[in-house]
Image (cartoon, helix red, strand yellow):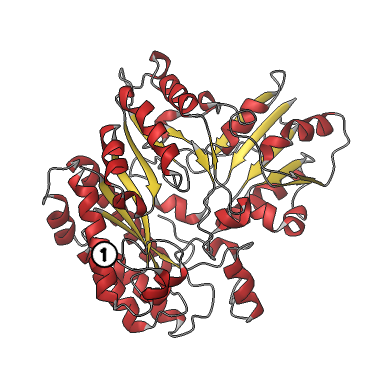
Amino acid sequence: MKLLLIQPRSEWSVLGQTSHGKAGMPRLTLPALAALTPPDVDVQIVDCRVQAIDYEAPVDLVGITAMTCEAPAAYKIADTFRAKNVPVVMGGYHASFMPEEAGLHADAVVIGEAELIWRDVLEDFRSGRPRSSYVADRLCDLNSEVPIPRRDLLDRTKYSTFNTIQATRGCSKGCDYCSIDAFFGPTFRKRSPDDVAGEIRGMLSPQSLHKGRIDRHVVFIDDNLTLDRGYARKLFTVLAPLGIQWACQATTELAEDDELLGLAARSGCIFVSVGFESFNPLNVARLRKNWAAAGMTADQATAQPLEAVCDGFRRSVERFHKQGVCVLGNFMLGFDDDDSTVIAKTIRASFQINVDVAYYHIVTPLPGTRSYDGLAREDRITTRDWALYDSGHVVFSPKLLSAGDLQAGLWQAYREFYSISRIAGRVFSSPRHLLARLALNWSTRRKSMRMMAMSSHPGKTS
């Protein structure tokens, strides 16, 4: 049996490629499924961000996973294979939330975590008795049911950062717009820290040599690595002897814990991606995170001025910087309490808190989330062209400003933050991981310029 596993691409992911055609980093879903595939199955992975699909190659089954913004590309791929009488199974976030829609393009749909049912899927297709849907009735045990991914099936030369790993899954913050909460529920599962360290040692083995050297940079793709502080302490303790430099996603709560942040830095943490999301106190009160950094409780949030939130976030960034940790700040525009003046203030405030890199996102109501359900009930969703659900396009009717003003605010944020003068002033103000900060700033400037060009000329991706 020949199995082809495909990761489709969105237009946004193409924009994020380097000038050498590299993608940022590999995802682990398909390599994990490959590791669960019986050894007598010939399996190949195609990441469409960096590879082309050979539709003429002999294949017995195609598996596709896709996020919402990748769904149109996934459907086109699936339809092409099915027209050649090649069966297709589809899973991932979008298929799990929209199984009937996905079922129009696939012979079978996997709903939920595929690790639990992947072998059943393969066996049913081999025997010629596949079901139209496979539903995982629980969440898997990360320590016994999730294998070490088959990274050997990926071409490491196609990625800017190859060493990705997952120690935990889920986030219990429960933000309305978050598909993580919608998919996993309010759960947080953890792998054994020793197992995580062992997997990293494997990535640092002589077999992983690239251009004669071992890449000691690691990115944790966890949704919120430090949610359980006790677990994080144990993990950072076993990471310290490995001599790696690593990055992760976390909230401002990490900055509020001096001991934990110091341990993270000593174990090799050099970059943290932080979801600041909003400076608007009304939004902070609803987001269920960042209150402490903003110097308030949820009940107090609405009484605070935006400037107070800005000051609190600036102090958080200072704490990260004091430990030598760089900060990638994420900011969201277009919440229901955001008007044009708030958007302008948010853009200015994002400059003032001194993050090293910034990503701006338009609030996007992804299927399966409470945000999507609420806007759908209010008939405020303006398009279901899923390719636009990439946080770079307005897909709903904002409450206090026009869609055009919101879109213009996104472009203005990127245009100002990534001007040549601002990049130079930001990057060369400190020697802290200078080359990494410069590379990220320059690549994001390049992507944002492409974003704006594509917005002016729809369908153009280069």
Element type at mark 1: helix
Q: Is residue 374 among what the camera can see?
A: yes
Q: Is residue 49 left or right of residue 116?
A: left
Q: Residue at x 77, y 53 (%)?
A: 103
Across and down, in percent, residue 23 comes to 42, 42
In the displayed image of the protein, which residue is found farthest to the top?
206
Q: Assess disc 1: are there few (<14), some (14-19) or many (≥20) residues with their C-alpha within 10 Å of its C-alpha.
A: many
Is 63 situated above or below 13?
A: above
Identify which amino acid the numbered label 1 is placed on: Gly
**In what quadrant of the picture does the N terminus appear?**
top right
Is 127 situated above or below 353?
A: above
The residue labelled by disc 1 is: 312
Q: Is residue 416 among what the camera can see?
A: no
Across and down, in percent, residue 273 comes to 35, 50
Quarter-wise, where is residue 349 in the image?
A: bottom left
Q: Residue at x 74, y 42 (%)?
A: 88
Q: Is residue 290 left or right of residue 348?
A: right
Q: Residue at x 74, y 34 (%)?
A: 61
